[in-house]
Amino acid sequence: EYAIRKKNGRVILALPRRVAPIHAHVLPLVSKNGLPEKAQEVYRLLLRAGFEVEYDESGRIGRRYVRADEIGTPLCITIDYQTLEDNTVTLRDRDTWEQVRVPIDRLPNSIRRFIYEDVPLHSLGEPVKTIK
């Protein structure tokens, strides 16, 4: 069953993962220092793998998460400075806001498992410690 719900004042379109029209949003942390170029590489990789993905580098990262949540995108993929160092990205779950780091070479399989096999995000990578 589809639901529009609120979390911390934000509207989230909680579509089932497998029916969401967009599987993931690819987001460079900032629009400089090589992050957009790396994010475009990840975007093209996912398109070639058959996923429906969007690319967004406009505005602050928090606002981009909000936009993705509002249209029901199950995953956001953030490309940050650590990506340039170790070739990992951050996956963020729309419903739980949980975040894990996943190597780019495992990204298509990780997304496939999350979307189509309902594998929980925490089992796909290393947890990201967030400041609360």
Image: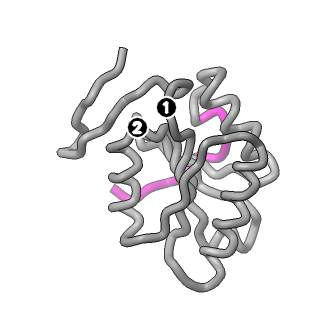
Query: Up-down: is 72 above or below 105?
Result: above
Q: Residue furthest bottom?
A: 33
Q: Is residue 117 magenta?
A: no
Residue situated in front as seen by the camera: 102 or 14: 14
Q: Amino acid at mark 2?
A: Gly
Residue 13 placement: quadrant: top left
Is the C terminus in the top left, top right, bottom left or bottom right quadrant?
bottom left
Badge 1 vs badge 2, beta-carbon distance below 8 Å: yes
Q: Which residues are magenta?
A: 122-132
Query: Up-down: is 76 above or below 20?
Result: below
Residue 122 horizontal/vertical position (percent): 58, 36
Cα–Cα span, label 1 and label 2: 6 Å
Q: Residue furthest top?
A: 1
Give the color scheme: rainbow, by chain, secondary structure or one colour: one colour
Residue situated in front as seen by the camera: 129 or 23: 23
Image-based side of 74 in relation to 100, left or right: left
Q: Residue at x 66, y 38 (%)?
A: 111
Which residue is identified by label 2? 72
Which residue is identified by label 1? 20
Which secondary structure is most common in the magenta stretch? loop
Image-based side of 47 in relation to 95, left or right: right
Q: Which mark is residue 119?
A: none
Residue 86 horizontal/vertical position (percent): 76, 66
Q: Residue at x 65, y 69 (%)?
A: 82
